[in-house]
Image: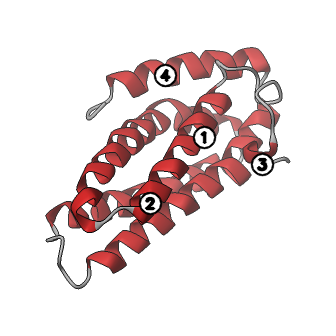
Amino acid sequence: MTSLAAQSIAELGGHGSVLSRQKRDHVLLDALLSELGDAPPARQRRVLLRVHRLVFPHAFAEEAVLWPVIRRALPDGETLTLRVEREHQVINELATQLDRADLGAPDRATLLDRFVALLRQDVRDEEDVLLPRLQARLTVVELRRLGAAWEVVRRLAPGA
């Protein structure tokens, strides 16, 4: 199976496919994480807010729309989604800690590094394993329908 990162929009099922929508968010997240790494501490909060506004509705829509389909479509779907849900929980906890941490706190840089590393790992898990396996099981029409549902839930998610 080919990682989503290496596939064209057409290979992903077109712009409306859930795979294309996921990949677009992942590309935007990568840019935000790079910006976050370059931001001085005083600007990090603003960039983190943009990360939160992207990541949390994205994850909410994954859990509400994609996970049930993955659990039905893949024999080990329950195990795969549980692992990603755990990653999401740790990311949520780190986000909360970062929000509460003083900009000058000695452990803030470590928290930030861990937060960024986990987000990047989450993207890799999705693009390299989870979503290509789903792609192998669904038709392009199904991926597009799933994309439409995912987008609606993402836009209506808390924090969107």
Q: Is residue 77 above or below residue 98?
A: above
Q: Residue at x 64, y 18 (%)?
A: 16
Judged from the image, the secondary structure of the residue bearing numbered disc 2 is: helix
Q: Residues within 10 Å of mark 1 (few under 14, many from 20)?
A: some
In this view, the mark in front (1 or 4): 4
Kindly identify the amino acid type of the residue bearing the numbered disc 2: Arg
* Foreground pick, 9 / 133: 9
Can the viewer see residue 83 in this picture?
no
Judged from the image, the secondary structure of the residue bearing numbered disc 3 is: loop
In this view, the mark in front (2 or 1): 2
Judged from the image, the secondary structure of the residue bearing numbered disc 1 is: helix
Give residue 60's mark.
none
Give residue 86's mark.
2
Reading the image, the residue beneath label 3 is: 3
Reading the image, the residue beneath label 4 is: 151
CA separation in Å, label 4 and label 2: 23 Å
For residue 20, which quarter of the picture? top right
Q: Residues within 10 Å of mark 2 (few under 14, many from 20)?
A: few
